[in-house]
Amino acid sequence: MNTQLHVQAIDLLRSLIELPSLSGSEDQTATCIEDWFKAKKICANRHNNNVWASNQYFDKGKPTLFLNSHHDTVKPAPAYSINPFEAKIEDGKLFGLGSNDAGASVVALMSVFLYFYEKQDLKFNLLIALTAEEENSGKKGMRSLLEYLPKFDFALVGEPTEMQMAIAEKGLLVIDGTANGVAGHAAHYSGENALYQALDDIDWIRNYQFPKVSELLGKVKMTVTQIEAGTQHNVVPSICHFVIDIRVNELYSNQEVFEVINAHTKSKLIPRSLHLNSSSISEQHPLVQAGLKLQKSVYGSPTLSDQALLSCPSLKMGPGNSSRSHNADEFVYLNEITEGIDIYIKILNEIL
């Protein structure tokens, strides 16, 4: 099934792997993707290193399905035993940086978009965007693109999920905390220890449980991951900095979580951003129901993606395995790519 699409997808992924595309420096892969659309006689648009296109018979009166994945990568892990920028095929595996996360999803979704591109009388429009700076949550990725895209109603986001359906994804909230005290000599009963003040807040963070627990994503998880205070052994610290990493389930917004924490602590808290909210899609949504017909399972994902930036129902699903992401000697199985394309097409055929 779809043999030509399979071959073209693997060839495209090999080309992408061999073009370094670290977050913030994806110009070469963006051009490669543009060139692929041009070769297929599809009009594509580009903003920064984000490339997008819509189906030939796009109708503003119809709802729109948004297809998205990212073509940027993290830096190669130090333990690579092979050239991370060489697309090497061995034992049914395609090796190379970004092959699994998320190159396989990129080429699979592009193949599916091509499959439906010229079809008339679809129930939904198709809009595809291959985006930059996902790995570093950069300002020139999806965040910069949304204002240029036509309105869309639901989304399919390609990330390595073994083609199972992540119908919910935890959001991320990072908070910088500062406790202020008064410096003094450690030998005397002078000063006000900022470190002790911070510890009171950290103890609350460690023990507090948000009451709403998600069936898919579990509890909101708060972890203090960094702390810094003091200049020398005999001086009571007057300031203490700490960082809180919070993984938010779909039952809360980041703003709601921040307000609860801020109300129960004394330190000055500043969120680095509030926009990386949890995302979800109903199990009753036609897109999910189509996957269930193919015996695909549903689950909640602990990892973050560009889903967090979308204000519509979104499903995360793609070829590859999340456990391989960011690892040395990253790879994807060739049959994961080809099966991914076929499964995507079967799902969209159910709703389009």
Image (tube, rainbow, N blue to C red):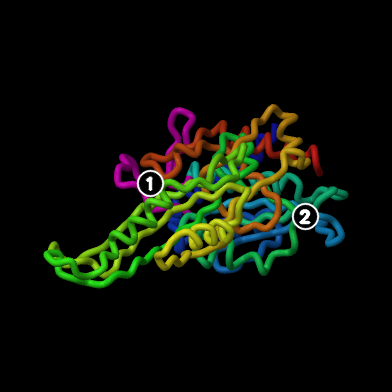
Q: Left or right: where does residue 136 sit relative to residue 279?
A: left
Q: Secondary structure at mark 1?
A: loop
Q: Position of residue 117 (x, y in %)?
A: 76, 50
Residue 151 location (% of width, % of height):
75, 62
Q: Nearer the viewer, residue 134 or 21?
A: 134
In this rendering, the label closer to the viewer, 2 or 1: 2
Q: Is residue 98 positioned above or below 191 on the image?
A: above
| Residue 80 among magenta residues | yes
Disc 2/disc 1 C-alpha distance (Å) = 37 Å
Quarter in which the C terminus is drawn = top right
Vertical side of 82 occupied by 121: above or below: below
Magenta segment main secondary structure: loop
Which residue ends up furthest to the front in the rendered image?
189
Query: Can you identify the residue that label 2 sits on?
Result: 64
Query: Which residue is at a point 19% across and 71% down the rendered structure image?
Result: 184
Q: Secondary structure at mark 2?
A: strand
Picture coordinates of residue 191, whole percent (x, y): 22, 70
Q: Quadrant of the N terminus?
A: top right
Q: Is residue 341 magenta?
A: no
The residue where tag 1 is placed is: 84
Which residues make up the magenta segment? 72-98
Placement of 39 over or under 149, stated as above or below: above
Instruction: Name the residue: 70% across, 62% down.
Output: 43
The residue under the point 26% across, 72% down is 182
Q: Residues within 10 Å of mark 2 (few under 14, many from 20)?
A: many
Among numbered discs 2 and 1, the one appearing first in the sequence: 2
Task: Pick the residue in front: 137 or 91.
Answer: 137
Residue at (64, 46) in percent of width and height: 109
